[in-house]
Amino acid sequence: MKVLVAVKRVIDYNVKIRVKPDHSDVDLTNVKMAMNPFCEIAVEEAVRLKEAGTATEVVAVTVGPKAAQEQLRTALALGADRAIHVQTDERVESLGAAKVLAKVVEEEQPDLVILGKQAIDSDNNQTGQMLAALTGRAQGTFASELKVEDGKLTVTREIDGGLQTLSLALPAVVTTDLRLNEPRYAKLPDIMKAKKKPLDTKTPEELGVEIAGKLKLVGVEPPAERQGGVKVGSVDELVDKLKNEAKVIS
Amino acid sequence: MSILVLAEHHDGQLAEATAHVVAAGRAIGGDIDVLVAGENVGAVAEATAGLEGVARVRVADHAVYAHQLAEPLGELLVALADDYTHVLAAASTTGKNVMPRLAALKDVSQISEIIAVESADTFKRPIYAGNAIATVQSEDALKVITVRATAFDAVSTGASADVEAVDTVVDNALSSFVGEELAQSDRPELGAAKVVISGGRGMGNGENFKLLDGIADKLGAAIGASRAAVDAGFVPNDMQVGQTGKIVAPELYIAVGISGAIQHLAGMKDSKVIVAINKDEEAPIFQVADYGLVADLFEALPELEQKL
């Protein structure tokens, strides 16, 4: 079974973001970048499927600027066999990314595509679902457990209020939730080896995909600051304040 | 303008979120239809017809729509979308699951989790875990939108819209439902509760979450948790409040043993009143709390339960 895993280069999740002074966007100059955390979980799951003998090949793919090769090298260090970089400097929305990925799926014919459920920059939570729709595949979003058996994929999903289990026809698309696995760290020898693994570069034009979308970013502002309140000295004082000042309990 | 809202429902009951999404539809303006899709959803359709501002309830009642699986539900929405300028759903796990399929099949962008309507084509939405608010404008003919329910006040009930059947039936050979494990609780749902009490890593273990039970009982509160508590295995993920979990905005939010990581704050900072109980007086949670109590939670919680 061939597994395609998509990764995205995003701001490191530990970095406190700043809005540009002209409010045109978030300021990403000289900011530490990393692989999106949900994508790390996706890579880990693909590698585990290979280690379990279920997957025969793991191909990592990204859509983004030249620097996004770093994240592909990370995926290779974590255990992916080869990588595909669809290089563009344009701002890529979910639909554009899904169209590029659909083209890669058409060329590569993977049995399973694994993506993170959302990227922590745009927080869209769309690309996996869009890819599934564009390729006419079943989807298992927000997955916390995957099992491949008898040519079917059983996916347990994190839904509001609990868990849902679905049986999907293969080929399928899966997006990862937090509890699917705990990603490993890349070891130094693997990082060195990853430099020699094949990494293929293409452009959206070469794939014949138009990525420009019709969603315009008008502006970005910092959120309204919430003012801290007072410290209370005791539980009695707290209960009194909630009853008589905030009036939220009776 | 004409708007289609996808109704959110579980176990034969209309979910509260739908009334909030209809409110977002009213902010856009125009006729609002609501689609109720599922199996044996007559009661849901009836409840939906009572929502203020709804022109028409369209009901697709068929076994293929049971459990609202993404593939058939997406196709149904595609079949209906041509009659509308906007299709809205709650940014719930159901809405997030199906709406991008509709958008992709209609070749339009989706606008995720809006928190404000600026005009019929311009919306505000949080990005970077709520650390920035983007204003986006859609030039697509069809706007596919998910709505953060807590950002819009629910419409009232008491109306009586027309209810019409939708005959569209699609095939689904891609996915089938196997089972569901829903947390059994007499408590209100996290997203809809007026009071929420959450525990963090400071709770120490899952057993200690029982300390929150008595207080939750007295306040009619839902119980939540920080991602740190979920990652540590104290409690299941469906209790998680934060950017990667549930977004809540109750009247009263009580954070216990929660340091206040950005990702947690993104999920609760729109609460009306925030109380923090933490023994570390430097914890960032105190910067957003209206009332902070620096105390050992193992002493403070029993005392609080007793004094409520």
Image (spheres, rainbow, N blue to C red):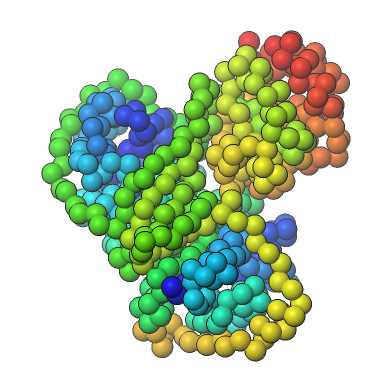
* Residue B107 image offset from top left, x and y in percent: 31, 65
Which residue: 43% across, 44% down?
A164
Which residue: 26% across, 26% down?
B43
Is residue A170 left or right of B251 when viewed as pictured? left
Question: Along the line of sight, which residue is nearer the eye, A62 or A123?
Answer: A62
For residue A122, say whether it is visible: no
Dividing the image into 4 quarters, which one contains the C terminus of chain A? top right
Dividing the image into 4 quarters, which one contains the N terminus of chain A? bottom left
Which residue: 28% across, 49% down?
B73
* Residue B273 image offset from top left, x and y in percent: 66, 27
For residue B275, say whether it is visible: yes
| B258 vs A190: above or below | above
* Residue B282 image offset from top left, x and y in percent: 86, 39
Is residue A214 left or right of B136 when viewed as pictured? left
* Residue B159 image offset from top left, x and y in percent: 27, 23
Question: Along the line of sight, which residue is nearer the eye, B109 or B28?
Answer: B109
| A133 vs B287: above or below | below
Q: How many marks?
A: 0
| A231 vs B29: above or below | above
Quadrant housing residue A207: bottom left
Is residue B50 left or right of B199 when viewed as pictured? left
Quadrant housing residue A183: bottom right
Which residue: 13% across, 44% down?
B167
Is residue B206 left or right of A236 when viewed as pictured? left
